Structure formats: C-alpha cells, structure tokens
C-alpha cells in the first residue's frame, strides 16, 4: 500500500537574490514521522485547486501575516509583516477546494487563521493590543516560545491528544477573533486566545494555533496531530 501524499503549503515567494519559495523542514519531518509523503505546494493564485489533485491530505503551514483586507481589519499596523496577496488568494481558494472535496486538513498557525477567514471569521491584527502580554505568544518575529493551553476534553482534539492541558510551542502575533461559520473553538490560552478550531460538520478538519511540528520528539502527544492527518488521508 502506498503512503498517503500530504500537500504542504510553502511560504511566500522570496524575490531578493535568487527567487525561491521555501518551507521549514520541521513540517516535512513531521509528515514523514507520521508515515506520509510530503509534497510541497507553492502559491498558485490562478488555480488553487490544481495542487491538491494529486494529494490525499493538506497541511496548511504558518508564515507571514494575512492581509487585513480579507477580513475587514485595520490596515498598516506597525507589527504586520510578510503579507503576500498571491499567497492569501491561493490559500483562501485552496481551503474552499479542500472543504468541497472533504480532503483531510491540518491547519497550523497562519493556516488556522486562513481557515477561519475563509469561513467568514476575522482576526485580531496584533494580539498584544487585545489581550496584553501576560501570555507570551512569541519571543520575537524570529523566535518561538512556550505556554500552556486548555483543551475541551469532549472535543475531537481533546480525545486525540488525551490531555486536558498541554504545553505548546507558540509563534504568532495575530489570532482568531470572531469564529467563522461551521467552526468552533476547542482550546484556549490562559489569556483567552483561541488556540484550536474544529469544523462542526467536517471531522477531517483540525486547526491549531500553536506549532506542533516543533514538538514531535518520541512520545510527544503533538505527533498525534500529524498521525491523524495521515490516517485520514489513508482513508482510515
């Protein structure tokens, strides 16, 4: 039996020097550790659905900010970075195509925010403006940090991870504000920031604000997120 193919979205195009797209290898390593075959999926705003024609599941990665034009947020915040119209348009279309096809989806950090915006939700443009800095959601733009999250134990996520609370790797400054259609929050930071979403009518969809790909050491509960993606991509 062939291994499931998991499409992994890349970051925005880098145009300085030699133009390229890239993605941190931690996402690739996590998919491989879970038994999947990673396929990199660069932005293609003209045909977002084409990339998943050969995929059994989709991993939406983190990265730069979503332009507030997509959710009615204020433009020009001094902490905004790496906005990319091509990537935004591509991933919003990709989410729509993935949901139409009932393809297994794991959305991480920016990926969770894209899912929420695609379904009509909106974002806090800069979390410290809303919840303060008692809970550090990132060390800096270049460094992650750690904090605990509380899980709804009756949720699919809670059952999958088998925990009521969890220490997570965190690396973001935007976050979910109004939850999108068909979604519900199932995990929270101590300051009330939404840390995970589930789709009410799509059990193949999970969205996580933290970075589980940075915590896949042996016996880590975070690896279960990737294993579940691969299991569903296999048809399990």
Image (cartoon, grey):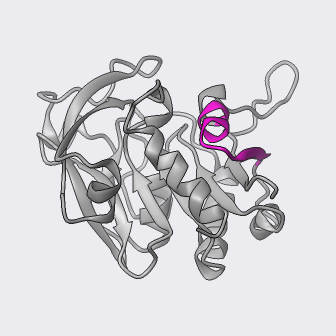
- Residue at coordinates 63% horizontally, 71% vertically from top-left? 103
Q: Give the position of the N terminus as an image quadrant.
A: bottom right
Q: Is residue 140 above or below residue 74?
A: above
- Residue 145 lies, in percent from the top left, at 32, 21
Magenta range: 28-42
The residue furthest right is 18
For image coordinates 67% across by 37% down, the residue present is 32
Determine which quarter of the picture holds residue 141.
top left
Above or below, 97 against 217 in this view is below
- Residue 2 x, y percent position in the rendering: 82, 55
- Magenta segment includes 214: no
Residue at (66%, 27%) from the top-left corner?
A: 25
Residue sitting nearer the eye, 235 or 82: 235
Q: How many marks?
A: 0
Left or right placement of residue 133 versus residue 77 in this view? left
The percent coordinates of residue 202 (x first, y second) are 46, 77
The residue closer to the viewer here, 171 or 204, is 204
Judging depth in this view, the residue of 53 and 125 nearest the camera is: 53
Left or right: 178 with respect to 61? left
Where on the picture, by quarter, is residue 203?
bottom left
Q: Is residue 80 above or below residue 152?
A: above
**From the viewer's perspective, is 131 left or right of 233?**
left
Residue at the far front: name it. Answer: 1
Residue 153 percent across, percent down from the top left: 18, 58
The answer to whether any part of residue 178 appears in the image is no
Quadrant in the picture for the C terminus: bottom right
Residue drawn at x 85%, y 29% is 19
Residue 67 as seen in the image, left or right of residue 220: right
Residue 42 in sight here: yes
């Amino acid at each position: 039996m062939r291994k499931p193919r998991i499409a992994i979205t890349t970051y925005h195009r880098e145009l300085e020097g030699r133009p390229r797209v890239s993605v941190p290898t931690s996402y690739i390593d996590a998919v491989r550790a879970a038994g999947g075959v990673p396929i990199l999926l660069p932005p293609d705003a003209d045909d977002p659905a084409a990339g998943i024609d050969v995929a059994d599941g989709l991993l939406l990665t983190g990265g730069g900010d979503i332009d507030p034009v997509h959710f009615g947020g204020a433009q020009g915040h001094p902490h905004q970075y790496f906005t990319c119209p091509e990537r935004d348009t591509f991933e919003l279309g990709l989410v729509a195509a993935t949901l139409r096809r009932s393809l297994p989806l794991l959305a991480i950090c920016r990926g969770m925010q894209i899912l929420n915006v695609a379904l009509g939700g909106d974002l806090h443009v800069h979390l410290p403006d809303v919840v303060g800095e008692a809970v550090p959601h990132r060390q800096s733009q270049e460094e992650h940090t750690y904090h605990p999250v509380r899980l709804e134990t009756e949720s699919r996520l809670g059952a999958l991870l088998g925990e009521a609370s969890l220490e997570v790797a965190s690396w973001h400054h935007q976050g979910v504000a109004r939850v999108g259609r068909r979604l519900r929050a199932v995990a929270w930071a101590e300051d009330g920031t939404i840390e995970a979403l589930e789709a009410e009518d799509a059990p193949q969809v999970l969205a996580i604000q933290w970075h589980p790909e940075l915590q896949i050491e042996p016996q880590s509960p975070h690896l279960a997120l990737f294993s579940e993606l691969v299991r569903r991509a296999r048809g399990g």
